[in-house]
Amino acid sequence: MKISQFVRDSVLEKEIVVIKELQQFSKEIRGIGRNLNQLAILCHQGKITCPNIEHVERKVDEVWQLLNLLVVKTQRKRN
């Protein structure tokens, strides 16, 4: 949640939901995504043999979609 949204919700006395575990989880997923992007760049540059990471990319995308769905559901409950 951005600070501006937190302030608005506080002023309007809306319920604020913080799921601390998701913060670390999303950080880890971003890191995995960055690593996949770096592998793709190295493959395109010809510096490494391209591994087949399509399955991993699909799984990371699936996890992001589930995380975004959870965030949307949490926001709907607050409004």
Image: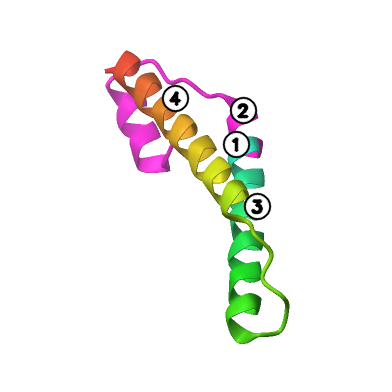
Image point 58% across, 41% down: which residue? 26
Amino acid at pointer 1: Gln
Task: Determine the residue positioned at 42% across, 41% down.
Answer: 3
Q: Quadrant of the N terminus?
A: top left
Separation of residues labelled 3 and 4 (CA atoms): 20 Å
> How far from the left and from the top, in percent, is residue 70?
44, 25
The residue tagged 1 is 23
| Separation (CA) of disc 3 from disc 2 | 19 Å
Residue at mark 4: 70
In magenta stretch: residue 19: yes
From the image, state whether disc 1 or disc 4 is nearer to you. 4
Of tags 3 and 2, which is closer to the observer? 3
User: Mark 3 is on which residue type?
Assistant: Ile
Label 4: few (<14), some or many (≥20) within 10 Å? few
Q: Between tags 3 and 4, which lies in front?
A: 3
Q: Is residue 79 left or right of residue 75?
A: left
Q: Is residue 64 above or below residue 42?
A: above
Residues rendered magenta in the picture: 1-24
Quickly name the residue at label 3: 32
Residue 79 in sight in this render: yes
Residue 42 colored in magenta in the image: no
Q: Residue at x 47, y 30 (%)?
A: 66
Q: Amino acid at mark 2?
A: Lys
